[in-house]
Image: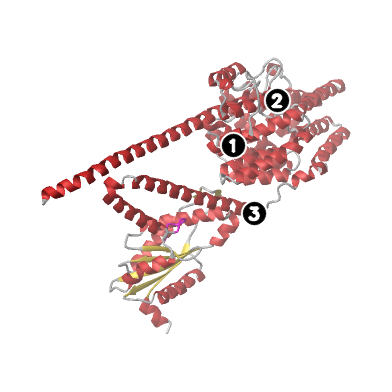
Amino acid sequence: MNKRFSCAISPLFYFFFQKSRLYLFAVLLSLISVNSVANNYQSEEERFRQLGNIVNTVMYMWNSPSGMSNEEITKLIVASDIQQDSSEIGKVIKTVLYHLDGSLSTSDSKIPLDLAEEASPADWAYLKNINVSRYVALKAVFIMYKTANAHSDTSERLQYSIPLLYSLKQEALKTSDHHAVAIASIWLAMEYSEINQMKAVVEIEYALPFLKHIDIENGLETALNKRMAHSWLADAYTNLNDYSRAVIHQEFVIEDSKEHDIATSYVYIGVINSLSHLQRFDDALTMVDEAEQVSITNQSAPQTLFSLWLKVSVFLHRDEPNDREEIIALTKNLSHFEGITFPTNINLLPVLSALKTTYLALEGSDAEFKKAMNTLTSDFNSQAKHSSYSTSILLGKHAHLSKLYKLRGDFKNALLHQHKYDLIRSQPNGSYAHLDELNTESPLQRDITITKLQEMARLKDKQTLKLKAERFQALSFALVAVMSTFLLFWFWRRQRSRAQASEIDDLTGALYRRVMFKEIAKPMSSKLSSCLVLIDLDHFKKINDRYGHVVGDEVLTIFGQVVRQRIRKTDKFCRYGGEEFLLYLHDTTEKNANALLEDIKMSLESQQNWSTTEATFSVSFSAGVIQVKAERNISKIIKACDNLLYRAKSTGRGKIETMSFPAYLNENI
């Protein structure tokens, strides 16, 4: 009998063994293929990152007296082997560097690169699939420099650059990548600053929560970062004469620069100017002392000269008795500062020329003063001519010339330049009306858009996970001949896991209501005491209205985490409504339930900082607790909890009301 059975099964076993070898070989090939694709993606990502950093270096340092020299940058470009790179990444990077060369190079210093043909839309799309944020940053650079090369006049450039950047922003919105959208917005804000300060402010405020801090490893996509955004907001609010708001953002810039050990005296100009306009002169002079100390620490002659100008500017604003004597003493001998140059990537006024003219306004002859004013005016005009953003330079020019004429006592010319300053500030931008109409979204609508994007990202993650699971399942079934028992067990566990996942709220990790009622029906009918708790987050609607639904979602998520960390496996946690939660505490008395809830409330209230907003606030909740024993009517118990919750909220919120079910019934007979 045993022998016949053995003879019969041997061919069957051999057949499955041969098939299994084929399946295992196929699985091995698949795994090798997947690993190869993953390695190739990592290699492409790293290549894109390195070349993106070279673009960033060229953009900010080519032909600049600060940072790397042209020779050092040339070595980087040659070492990258970009000229011979015919890949999609290589073609796009060469195209961008070509347009940078058109704006940044001179006849004596050209970027060492030739371009046979520009990158195609398909090449750009390839980069977008590798890294969306870096793609948007690179595309913005391309748009800016291509339009600047084609249209030397600022007004002409804006006619093309703003619509293109707006389209780039719409493209980024469809990717659900918040950082990519923020990058497009901040570049768009830079262009809007020339024609509509309020538009610029809206775009920067919109981008600010999602911008990152500067990261040397990812220089291109963090070149326009949180510190830069705060600096631009400060400039915008200064131009809108809202100096109090400007000071807030300028102080952030200074503190962030200190934190990253890159503080210079240049970052103090905004806050000192704003404090002077607010007539907080003592505070302004304190900041001047700080700027002087920074220049000493940095051992920088240009920063020392700039600190001197900062002090003079405060005295010019204040113009109290003895201030003129201070100005004369500070500006009398400036010969040791001759030949000093400032970084070209910082829009500073002609400092040395301004200081000399200030001295001559008080001590020079009419001829000397007139000559110095002509030189200073020429320096301002030269800066404006070579800048893509001339409006702020021209405003600074007329504001400063007005002060100098006033210092000289020539009030007629002082008034003339003040009038020119006001004219630039108030001149109509009718030719740009169609550009203003491009973006009609309200900040509220943008909050809704961001929330939708976040939901799309969650959905995309779920679909990706599901797709991976299905692929893995398909591969696993290929081994069914030799692993049928194992696979059946695995499949059962997988299905059970999915069923459990469908019963849980993604945001808070809490059970859905129908699942909760099913889970607690039997335990509540036992003879053990247990507690049912109804919780409501206090003023949650105000959080959503004030900070947006993204912040509201984070509050719900943190609350869910805090609760789940403190309850036992025998307890159950349910999302009962929008911000209402139901908690079942097994084998628990009123007293113990109250202690647990106080602990949860204390932990939640200690949470002051949130990742989705810079605002600081805490969250509390109110709760109604009913102790039950051998009860079956869950609806009545929840109604009792609801009444106690109402009592807790009506006495000032942040309260916990507890009662046994029999006592509650007696009270409400």
Task: Residue at 59%, 37% (x, y): give it.
Answer: 125
Q: Is residue 659 magenta?
A: no
Which residue is most to the bottom?
669
User: Which is more N-terminal, label 1 or label 2?
Assistant: 2
397 left or right of 25 in image: right
Circle number at residue 125: 1
Q: Quadrant for residue 156, please give it.
A: top right
What is the spatial separation of the Cα atoms under label 2 and label 1, in whole angstroms? 25 Å
Q: Quadrant for residue 143, please give it.
A: top right
Mark nearer the viewer, 2 or 1: 1
Element class at badge 3: helix
Q: Name above or below for residue 575 compared with residue 118.
A: below
Total numbered labels placed on residues in the image: 3
Query: Which segment did they paint magenta?
Result: 505-510
Task: Residue at 76%, 40% (x, y): give it.
Answer: 195
Circle 2 is placed at which residue position?
A: 103
Circle number at residue 445: 3
What is the spatial separation of the Cα atoms under label 2 and label 3, in whole angstroms? 37 Å
Give how far across and how far down residue 176 sits, in percent. Answer: 56, 46
Q: Work out whether residue 64 or residue 619 is closer to the camera in this orientation and state it.
A: 64
